[in-house]
């Protein structure tokens, strides 16, 4: 039976629903934690992908493309380690959430899924829906990168390019859902997506023999990976598999930085289109994660994004510009004294450069 959902604001519970009647996003009612010590890495069957950690996951494996277990590699030029999320099946960390979300869709009997996205989440949901034999409706900005739009269409999804802001795209998708045109496989609203992205933290810890880094620096839009990391590291600590939660340090784009710069600025970073979110659904939880982990969030402009994007390319990392806000933020955090050169740091590189 599919896991029950609960509203953390009003405590209402549901068998399945995309948001509470009070308007708050939902989470799973029960949190799964293993009742055994952390295993040796050699005892993990990584062939199970994300479900290597099924004791933490509230969703059965119903579909997969072999996502997970992305490499964790040294990046000496940045004095940190990079986790190469961009080598995932569709080229972004969103595959983690897509695998669990489409598995949840199958659990509850959905036949058609709806998603809104600037590109990567839409590609992932469309691709995993195709793998599962589900129809998909994907709403995107009209000016989304053509390579991402082609990937969505190649997966057989119905594409809905939408004029206006990123918020207008979400509104169009929600209208479709409320007109009963599909099950909302939203990477920002659906708790199943965060069940998948938390596996990023599980893998980082396992690849480091259950010693977590001092800090993780991540791109921050809707907080899909940021909150996944927070939930994952928190679960590991609560299970006794690790001793603490790393500091979580967010990187937003100037002009689209409601957490780092709530007053806004006219200096828009249009290169980092993957995090152009002015109204994150789970902003309250993002702020809680920052406060709980002694974290922070800063906004990165286009000039620093472009410079870091070029630098990453020259070092052999073929990633999209949105990834570069994280490494640019790493530089900025060190310059501000928030991090120092002795800190042990992991940075995820979240999306491939092959989509343009």
Image (cartoon, grey):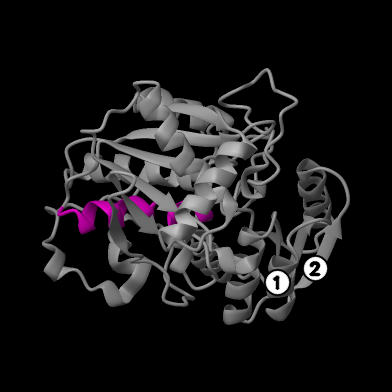
Residue 117, compared with residue 45, is above or below; it is: above
Callout 1 crowding tier (Cα within 10 Å): few <14, some 14–19, many ≥20: many
Residue underneath mark 1: 152
Residue found at x 12% / y 69%: 42
* Lower position in the chain sequence, tag 1 or tag 2: 1
Using residue 141 as the reference point, say whether residue 103 is left or right of it.
Answer: left
Residue 195 lies in quadrant: bottom left
Q: Nearer the viewer, residue 224 or 82?
A: 82
At 66% from the left edge and 62% from the top edge, which residue is drawn? 122
Looking at the image, which is closer to me, 146 or 162? 146
- Find disc 2 in the rendering and name its residue: 159
Q: Position of residue 214 (x, y in %)?
A: 25, 36
Magenta extent = 193-209
Give the main secondary structure of the magenta stretch.
helix
**Viewer-nearest residue: 59 or 355:** 355
Whether 48 is drawn above or below 142: the answer is: below
Q: Is 297 contained in the magenta span? A: no
Residue 198 part of the magenta segment: yes
Q: Which secondary structure, mark 2?
A: strand
Give the left or right position of residue 238, taking residue 24 as reference.
left
Query: Is any atom of residue 9 visible in this view?
Result: no
What is the C-alpha distance between the residues marked 1 and 2? Answer: 7 Å
Query: x, y percentage for residue 146?
Result: 75, 66
Q: Are marks 1 and 2 in contact (CB under 8 Å)?
A: yes
Image coordinates of residue 244 in percent, x first then y, are 22, 35
Relative to 209, 245 lies left or right: right
Horizontal side of 257 relative to 83 (left or right) equals: right
């Amino acid at each position: 039976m599919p896991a029950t959902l609960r509203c953390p604001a009003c405590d209402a519970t549901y068998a399945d629903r995309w948001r509470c009647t009070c308007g708050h996003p939902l989470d799973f009612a029960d949190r799964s934690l293993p009742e055994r010590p952390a295993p040796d890495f050699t005892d993990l069957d990584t062939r199970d992908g994300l479900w290597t950690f099924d004791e933490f996951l509230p969703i059965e494996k119903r579909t997969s493309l072999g996502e997970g277990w992305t490499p964790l590699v040294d990046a000496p030029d940045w004095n940190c380690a990079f986790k190469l999320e961009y080598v995932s099946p569709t080229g972004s960390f969103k595959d983690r959430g897509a695998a669990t979300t489409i598995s949840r869709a199958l659990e509850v009997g959905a036949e058609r899924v709806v998603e809104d996205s600037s590109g990567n989440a839409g590609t992932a949901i469309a691709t995993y829906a195709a793998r599962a034999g589900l129809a998909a409706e994907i709403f995107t900005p009209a000016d989304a990168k053509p390579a991402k739009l082609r990937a969505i269409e190649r997966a057989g999804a119905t594409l809905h390019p939408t004029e206006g802001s990123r918020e207008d795209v979400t509104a169009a998708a929600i209208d479709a859902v409320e007109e009963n045109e599909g099950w909302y496989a939203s990477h920002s609203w659906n708790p199943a997506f965060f069940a998948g992205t938390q596996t990023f933290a599980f893998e980082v810890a396992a690849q480091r023999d259950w010693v977590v880094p001092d800090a993780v620096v991540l791109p921050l839009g809707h907080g899909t990976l940021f909150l996944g990391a927070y939930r994952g590291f928190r679960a590991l600590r609560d299970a006794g598999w690790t001793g603490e939660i790393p500091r979580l340090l967010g990187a937003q784009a100037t002009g689209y930085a409601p957490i780092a710069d709530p007053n806004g600025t006219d200096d828009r970073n249009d290169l980092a289109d993957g995090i152009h979110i002015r109204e994150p659904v789970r902003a309250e939880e993002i702020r809680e994660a920052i406060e709980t982990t002694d974290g922070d969030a800063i906004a990165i402009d286009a000039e620093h994004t472009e410079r870091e994007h070029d630098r990453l390319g020259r070092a052999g990392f073929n990633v999209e510009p949105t990834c570069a806000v994280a490494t640019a933020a790493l530089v900025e955090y060190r310059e501000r004294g928030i991090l120092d050169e002795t800190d042990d740091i992991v940075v995820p590189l979240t999306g491939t450069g092959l989509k343009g």
